[in-house]
Amino acid sequence: MKRKSLKVVAAVLLAALLAAGCSARNEAADYSTGYSMPGEQPQKEPMESGESVAYDASYGLSASAKEAMRSEAAGEQYGGRKVILTYEIRLETDAFDSLLTALKERLETAGGYLQSSYIDGKKPEIYGDSGRTATLSLRVPAAGAEAFFSDVKAMGTVQSEQAYTDDVTAEYFDRETRLEVLNMQLERLKSILVETDNLADVIALETEIARVTMEIEALTGELRRYDALIEYTTIDITVYETVYREGPAAAKTVGERIEAGFSDSLNGVGVFFVDAFVWFVSALPVLLVLVAVVAVVLLCVRAVRKRRKARTHKNGDDGNKLYEENKQ
């Protein structure tokens, strides 16, 4: 029993040391290569293609096994490196709706999808009006992203364009190797758990298994996020709508200006009467209710006045009669 307990304790300690070693090496790799997680600013001096994060035999992987795993996972993109590519472009056009339609069709052809979109403003009517603005975020397969971006540039007048690359090779393979080590560690802990029957050892092993499982899930999620960012390029597009003047406006004569002003005045008067008529018809139910209320109030006031007047006459007649009687 003591031997089993010692064996369990040794296994837990070994697992903790391996996890600490993985974490320390990951931090050292992140610091030395200057890489960051997706979403953070990439460093200006990426690691050379021949460099890699070194792992020793304590991780349970031979040099040949590590190299085979690294080569298989790297693929052929950028010579085996893991690079996240992002494009940004601003376009100006007087065919706003047509451009968005063409962009949608081209996106479907490329096998991409719309991640987000926002359209603001209203359609301009004359030169100088600020038109609509569309802000789009597209995801396109990395293999065809460059051709797609070239087609987008031809759809309007380019105001600005930028391209960003983020080399995440070191982080990707570091997390991949850590995941391999943790999976082996998990299998070892499970095999020891089956062999032990001591309650304290079982609790310690289950606690360590839960911790390792959480680390495996976290690393798996990070790798999936990297894969999504690498396999699909993000293209952020901003489209501005405008009205182009076809040529310099010809100077108008005095007569033409008077005619235009008179026409505008007549149009203004017509619009005023139309708006007044529409308002009157729309407010007619409310006006009828108000008229009815005013009529009732006036009738009540008139009735009260009649009663007061009748009382005044009656009191006056009674006073005259009393005066005559006293006089006699």
Image (tube, helix red, strand yellow):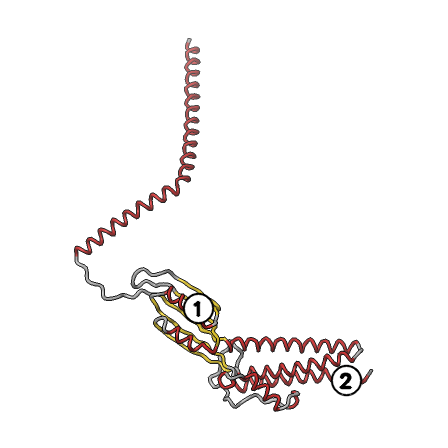
**Above or below, 251 relative to 66:** above
Q: Quadrant of residue 309?
A: top left
Q: Position of residue 96 (x, y in %)?
A: 37, 65
- Which residue occupies 56% across, 83% down? 73
Q: Position of residue 206 (x, y in %)?
A: 73, 76
- The kind of residue on which mark 1 rests is Leu
- Which residue occupies 19% across, 56% down? 256
**Left or right, 318 with reference to 14:** left
Q: Position of residue 166 (x, y in %)?
A: 49, 80
**Left or right, 208 with reference to 273:** right
The reply to whether callout 1 and callout 2 are in contact (CB within 8 Å) is: no
Disc 1 element = strand
Task: Determine crowd level at label 2: few under 14, some 14-19, many 20+ residues with C-alpha closer than 10 A.
Answer: some
Q: Quadrant of the C terminus?
A: top left
- The kind of residue on which mark 2 rests is Lys
CA distance separating discs 1 and 2: 59 Å
**Above or below, 328 relative to 40:** above
Q: Which residue is mark 1?
A: 136
**Of the numbered discs in the image, which one, if any, rests on residue 7?**
2
- Which residue occupies 62% across, 83% down? 178
Sequence order check, earlier mark of 1 and 2: 2
Q: Quadrant of residue 200?
A: bottom right
**Of the numbered discs in the image, which one, if any, rests on residue 2?**
none
